[in-house]
Image (spheres, rainbow, N blue to C red):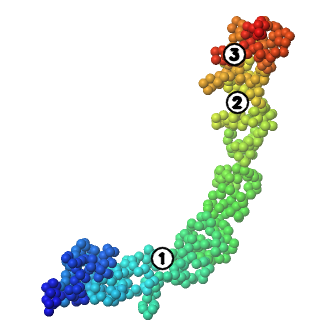
Amino acid sequence: MLVRTVSGQISPGKLTKAHAALEGIKNCTSCHEIGAQISEQKCLDCHKTLKSRIAQNKGYHVSSAIKGKQCISCHSEHHGVNFEMVRFEKATFNHNLTGYELKGSHKINDCTKCHKPDNIADIKQKMVKSTYLGLNTSCVTCHDDYHQKTLDNDCSKCHNFEKFKPASAFNHNKTNFALTGGHAKVDCNQCHKIEMRNGKKFQQFADVPFKNCNSCHKDPHQGEFGTDCKSCHSTESFAKMKSTSAFNHSLTGFELEGKHKSIDCKQCHDNRAGTKGDYKEFEKSKPINCLTCHKDVHDGKLSTDCKSCHTQQSFSIKNIRADFDHQLTGFELKGKHNQVDCRKCHTQTYMTAPIKNDMCKDCHQDYHKGDFNAMQPNDCNVCHSEAGFDESSYDLVRHEKSSFPLQGAHIATPCFACHRPEGSQWKFKNIGQKCNDCHDNIHLGFISEKFIPQNDCSRCHNSGQWSDVAFDHKQTSFDLVGKHVSINCSSCHFEVVEGKKVQKFIGLNQQCVSCHDNKHGTQFEENGITDCKRCHGFDKWDTSNFNHDNTKFKLEGAHLKVNCNQCHVPEMQNGITTILYKNGKLDCIDCHQ
């Protein structure tokens, strides 16, 4: 009696049927925290399915209308056993808040049409009475899979929510077989047959063969023209032929080339009299040649093999006539002539009209503008051939017979260097024969004209090697002897000033010290001039001209055997080491004690 009284004082009322198992003072903490309000976490610990959906951010309980609310604000307790904890206005409930919008036929007032155990896959959830959880948004959750897993589970790709038939969202043109021409008018059932499968009515939409027309249609040609019907026919009508066809015409024994590929089939297959027609007009015309259809404009003069000159691309003459024997005309085609369009030469209406062709200039202009008029025979083929005008057969042997035989470095000089300077017009007449006609006289103003009369470079140089100089230096006031003979001219007559070579021929100082270092300083100067030749010769730097007897100290006796440097020792003068030869030591006591 006491326990019942205490329970009545603590509990505000009976729990609903759903929570009846938690009735009693010992179970209060299953939902309540001691000294606190109801625990949201404890609610979700029992309602695990709902907890999982909230964790996945799915369903009505994570919507803007519910998120953040306490469970008890909607699902209160202790109002009696028969109290309805889940209460809402079904007619006005916003199903969008669940994450699944009701569209079309889904907009019904009876929730149990969808929310029923039959549509719940999870066994445990299926056992829960009056639940709105457990459904999947996939169509096959509630509806039978009419296509029996032969198509995508996303029914909305083809169907809408108003009604299952017709599949208004389906577009056949987005499949691998777009409907064109007559196919667009055919009833679906003619291609997609209805049958019984697994005891149910089934219509096949997937894996319908369509690679070739004969997958559905009978081949009236019985394979004679291959299996690619589209090469001749279109989907508009089997009787309507394409004006330009991709049909492999070579199967008929006559391969289409050039213009034949682009003309309308009916231009040849015209149901002409005396034939079967129906694209068999040439059945008895074997072999077929050009004259089967075309008139011979040459009246048989050039044989019946039109392809030796013409192509099927155009009746105009083809560029390279490998098959036509032009030698029959009396003018054999060689070299570049083989590449010239026939109409470049055959300018008259008929190709057989005579053409003057005795000489090159009958067709070609004189590129050299009369430079070779005096030459006999006077024709281009004397130097050029049909291989190309750029090449010339005029060689060194023939040049040797000209008024300017090539010698030395001129032999290795390319023709254009003299006959086409700076890329100008080729010139062979009156181009000069003297050196300065082509070359600049670099010594002009530096060497007296008496050494180069009339700018005649050959006075010193030759055409073999410009650096080989044969000038007779005896003509000058400074004869070359000894080592001077072998020295390169530029060593004395050229110097580099500020990075440029400067010539020096006139007014050169002939004293040795003007070119060579004076190692003796001013010891041997006479009147300000040191004459090296008094001691040294030109063959080598020795004392071959020096005679000690001519000095103030004649060598006698033992002095003849003494080495020079024992008396003439080096000393420093003005920071330079100099050997003193005039040391003033003439008496014995100057050297001996």
**What number is the disc on residue 125?**
none
Say which quadrant the N terminus sits in.
bottom left
Q: CA distance from mark 1 to mark 2?
A: 80 Å
What amino acid is at disc 1? Phe
Of helix, strand and loop, which one carries label 2?
loop
- Which circle's residue, 3 or 1, is located before the other in the chain? 1
- Which circle's residue, 1 or 2, is located before the other in the chain? 1
Q: Nearer the viewer, mark 1 or mark 2?
A: 1
In this rendering, the count of numbered labels is: 3
Q: Quadrant of residue 522?
A: top right
Q: As displayed, is residue 118 above or below residue 348?
A: below
Q: Quadrant of residue 175?
A: bottom left
The one of 462 and 183 positioned closer to us in this rendering? 462
Q: Nearer the viewer, mark 3 or mark 1?
A: 3
Q: Quadrant of residue 312?
A: bottom right
Q: Which residue is mark 1?
A: 177
Of helix, strand and loop, which one carries label 1?
loop
**What number is the disc on residue 571?**
3
| Position in image of residue 314 (x %, y %) | 61, 60
In the displayed structure, does residue 200 sit left or right of residue 114?
Answer: right
Q: Contact (CB < 8 A) between labels 1 and 2? A: no
| Position in image of residue 211 (x %, y %) | 53, 78
| Position in image of residue 125 (x %, y %) | 33, 86
Is residue 350 at all visible to an observer of this figure? no
Residue plotted at (64% across, 24% down): 496
Q: Nearer the viewer, mark 3 or mark 2?
A: 3
Residue plotted at (53% across, 72% down): 242
Q: Which residue is mark 2?
A: 431
Of helix, strand and loop, which one carries label 3?
strand
Disc 3 residue crowd, few under 14, some 14–19, many 20+, Cα 10 Å: few
Residue plotted at (46% across, 87% down): 193
